[in-house]
Amino acid sequence: KHMAEKEHLAILRQGIAAWNTWRRENPDIRPDLHGALLMDTQLAGVYLPEADLSEADLTKAQLAKAELAKAKLAGANLPEADLAHAHLTKADLRDANLHAANLSEANLTWADLRGADLSATNFTRANLRRADLRRADLHGASLIEADLLGAALTAANLERASLVKANLQGADLVEANLAEANLSWANL
């Protein structure tokens, strides 16, 4: 079983300042934190672009304003994580568990969220332009004022989701479950 690179994990455990300094000094290294146990960890503002965090446990982790562009988070556990204002452009979040996570105002442009558990997740004012949300579970999610321009929502579960003032122009909603979803003032 693939485990995180011990050196990378040790540096991360020294704190955000130490980690971000190390990242600036070693821009060519792709951080390997695959399967890392980072529950309840304070990682606000962490610089992790292109990092491998697949299958990592980030339950209740503080990742506000984190730089996670192109990060691999496939199969990662992120329930109740705080990812407000995080940058997740082109991030791989396939089958990730983001139940009740906070992604308000996060940038998820072109992110791959296929099959992810996004139930009760807060996406208020999030940028989900061109995001791939096929088969994602968005049951009860808050997508108030979210930008879903061109997003793929094929077979997504949007039951009881709040899409008030959401931009759904060009979004693919084929076979999406919109039962009891609130689409008031949504831009369709």
Image (spheres, rainbow, N blue to C red):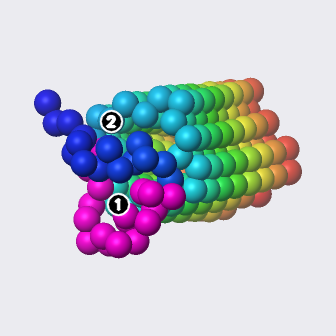
Residue 36: tell me if it is visible: yes
Where residue 35 sits in the image (x, y, percent)? 29, 35
User: Which image quadrant for residue 48?
Assistant: bottom left
Give the residue at mark 2: 36
Q: Which amino acid does label 1 sit on?
A: Glu
Residue 4 falls inside the magenta stretch = no
For residue 168, side relative to residue 33 (left or right): right
Q: Residue at x 33, y 35 (%)?
A: 36
Q: What stretch is highlighted in magenta?
A: 17-33
Q: Compared with residue 27, is residue 58 higher up or lower down, i.e. above or below? A: above
SS category of the residue bearing label 2: loop
Viewer-closest of 174 and 130 = 130
Count of picture labels: 2
| Quadrant housing the C terminus | bottom right
- Circle number at residue 50: 1
Q: Is residue 99 above or below residue 45?
A: above
Residue visible at 53% across and 30% down in the picture:
40
